Image (tube, rainbow, N blue to C red):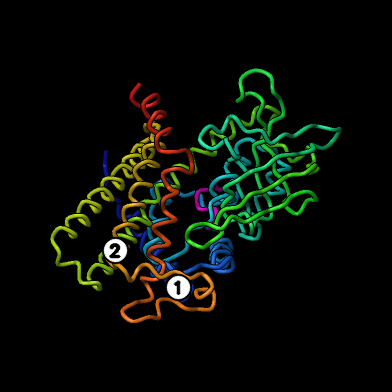
């Protein structure tokens, strides 16, 4: 296992760093570095900048319009974007559904859907979870009944992240009740502008509506929007989830937020508290360990070896780290992290109070928001069971 980057890889890093610095809008980087509210336009603006360069699908092979980078190059690209303060790319299109379309879609579907994903023009949402069907995803009940050349879809999805912005949604739907639950699931692509689709935002503890309910009431979906074969959707769903859980780990964002934690600790006067600094040191050890685990996977891929199936491990540790740095930031700022009035922030107010700073106003809301990370993408308890079965035997 060689964890050292080659001279060619280091040169690639410098090229990426220079391009990101030249093309990332300063006002967006400022928001990211200070955890200020990103609008839909902020997120899509960066996506389109990457799309114009051909890098929004940075993990795509060349035959589908991607750069064809190695696993190490993809890692370096992600790291340089994160450290520069680029918004995290909304993954549902380029990271999740695109690989499924590439692997299991037909040529017509690939030609129809991939260009809009690669350019950043089309906003995709994920229709997996339902009330009662989260980690137990195979129990989904949203029904799709075939009638001639179309499916009629009825049911509900929930926790649909940023679904209020969605233009298309990929859904797991039940097309059969025979046999095991997994054998009756299909993978459909649905236009969210279709009659019968209703999106209802859910206001969360942090004041935002990051997640949504999506209702389907006799929604007509053309049969040509079925990916692969009917009742084989569970296979495609597992392919997608491996990308989702690796993406959740997000070690590069953790490295950036670790540095932000240190800045906040110094500004708030707790850096000299040895016990608090011990907690930062313990977190840093965990971040480095996660990075080594990621690099171990990359090293195995680079040498042509089969790496361990550790997407679950990456998800477990990455999500716990995200919760910990959010908690330590809030603790560092103490009472100055508490004020959060969404109406005031909508009007441009960010920490304009005695003793407060711009960076501190969202700290409590970030802490509340990060409670989700050990639940979504398959709860960590379920992931530990999967790791025990697939890795430990």
Q: Residue at x 34, y 61 (%)?
A: 256
Q: Which mark is residue 293?
A: none
Secondary structure at badge 1 equals: helix
Marks 2 and 1, how far apart at CA: 26 Å
Span shown in magenta: 56-62
Q: Residue at x 24, y 67 (%)?
A: 265
Q: Position of residue 187 (x, y in %)?
A: 66, 36
Camera-side residue: 213 or 36?
A: 213
Query: In screen coordinates, is 186 left or right of 57?
Result: right
- Figure label count: 2
Q: Position of residue 133 (x, y in %)?
A: 57, 35
In which quadrant of the rendered view does residue 210 lie? bottom right
Query: In screen coordinates, is 121 left or right of 82?
Result: right
**Image quarter in which the N terminus is found:** top left
Q: Is residue 305 visible?
A: no
Query: In screen coordinates, is 83 left or right of 45?
Result: left
Categorize mark 1 by other alpha carbons within 10 Å: few (<14), some (14-19), many (20+). few
- Closest to the camera, between mark 2 and mark 1, is 2
- Main secondary structure found in the magenta portion: loop
**Image quarter in which the C terminus is found:** top left
Q: Position of residue 319 (x, y in %)?
A: 38, 47
Q: Is residue 332 visible?
A: yes
Camera-side residue: 92 or 175?
A: 175
Q: Which mark is residue 261?
A: 2
As drawn, 241 above or below 167: above
- The residue tagged 1 is 22
Look at the image and say whether residue 200 sits in the magenta stretch: no
As drawn, 176 above or below 244: above
Among numbered discs 2 and 1, the one appearing first in the sequence: 1
């Amino acid at each position: 296992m060689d964890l050292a980057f080659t001279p060619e890889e280091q040169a690639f890093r410098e090229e990426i760093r220079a391009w990101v610095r030249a093309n990332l809008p300063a006002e967006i980087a400022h928001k990211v570095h200070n955890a200020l509210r990103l609008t839909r336009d902020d997120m899509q603006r960066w996506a389109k900048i990457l799309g114009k360069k051909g890098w929004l699908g940075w993990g795509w092979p060349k035959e589908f319009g991607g750069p064809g980078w190695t696993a190490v190059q993809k890692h370096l690209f992600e790291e340089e974007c994160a450290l520069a303060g680029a918004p995290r790319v909304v993954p549902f299109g380029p990271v999740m559904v695109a690989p499924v379309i590439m692997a299991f879609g037909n040529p017509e579907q690939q030609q129809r859907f991939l260009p809009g994903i690669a350019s950043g023009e089309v906003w995709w949402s994920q229709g997996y979870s339902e009330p009662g069907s989260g980690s137990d995803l195979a129990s989904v009940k949203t029904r799709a009944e075939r009638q001639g050349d179309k499916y009629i879809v009825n049911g509900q999805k929930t926790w649909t992240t940023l679904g209020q912005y969605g233009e298309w949604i990929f859904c797991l739907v039940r097309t059969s009740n025979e046999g095991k639950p997994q054998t009756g699931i299909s993978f459909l692509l649905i236009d969210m502008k279709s009659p019968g689709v209703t999106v209802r935002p859910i206001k969360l503890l942090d004041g935002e509506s990051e997640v949504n309910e999506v209702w389907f009431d006799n929604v007509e979906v053309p049969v040509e929007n079925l990916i692969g074969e009917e009742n084989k959707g569970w296979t495609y769903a597992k392919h997608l989830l491996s990308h989702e859980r690796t993406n959740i780990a997000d070690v590069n964002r953790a490295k950036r937020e670790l540095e932000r934690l240190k800045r906040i600790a110094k500004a708030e006067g707790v850096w000299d508290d040895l016990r608090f600094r011990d907690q930062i040191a313990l977190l840093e050890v965990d971040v480095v360990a996660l990075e080594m685990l990621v690099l171990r996977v990359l090293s195995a891929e680079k040498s042509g070896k089969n790496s361990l199936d550790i997407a679950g491990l990456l998800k477990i540790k990455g999500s716990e780290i995200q919760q910990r740095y959010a908690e330590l930031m809030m603790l560092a700022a103490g009472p100055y992290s508490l004020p959060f009035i969404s109406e005031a922030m909508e009007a441009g107010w960010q920490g304009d109070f005695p003793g407060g700073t711009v960076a501190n106003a969202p700290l409590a809301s970030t802490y509340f928001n990060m409670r989700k990370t050990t639940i979504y993408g398959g709860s960590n308890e379920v992931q530990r069971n999967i790791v025990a079965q697939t890795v430990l035997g």
